[in-house]
Amino acid sequence: MANGPQLINYPFSRISFLCTQFTLIMADTPPRKGSKTGRILKLLLKIAVAGVCIWYVSGKIDFQKAGAALKQANWWWLGAALLTFILSKIFA
């Protein structure tokens, strides 16, 4: 085995799958004209769902291992990956 941090692949859990599906559905929903109260409630629902998803996912992260992995990471490759990601968002 190679030295360095090992990535652990967790299978998608039911809740992360539901969060992803909800996000995709909400992103594809065209904006509708409605009452101001309805729009505010919809916004609050989106914020609540996003908060629950972030809370759930952050509970699965071992931040000590993540920090150790970042300390051992090659910053040039991380910079190249970040640049590639930004360019893909610009040109997509």
Image: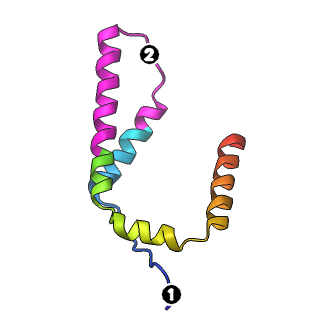
Secondary structure found at label 1: loop
Choose the circle earlier in sequence order: 1 or 2: 1
Asked whether, in this view, residue 3 is left or right of residue 55, the answer is right
Few, some or many residues within 10 Å of mark 1 (<14, 14–19, 20+) = few
Percent of width and height locating residue 32: 44, 15
| Amino acid type, label 2 | Arg
Percent of width and height locating residue 76: 67, 66
Secondary structure found at label 2: loop
Nearer to us in this view, 38 or 70: 70
**Residue 44 seen anywhere in this rendered image of the structure:** yes
Q: Which quarter of the figure has residue 36? A: top left
For label 1, the residue is 3
Measuring 44% from the left and 74% from the top, which residue is drawn there?
A: 7
Label 1, label 2: how many angstroms apart (C-alpha)?
Answer: 53 Å
Asked whether, in this view, residue 75 is left or right of residue 61, the answer is right
Q: Which mark is residue 32?
A: 2
Measuring 34% from the left and 46% from the top, which residue is drawn there?
A: 19
Q: Which quarter of the figure has residue 11? A: bottom left
Question: Does residue 31 sit above or below 36 in this rendering?
Answer: below
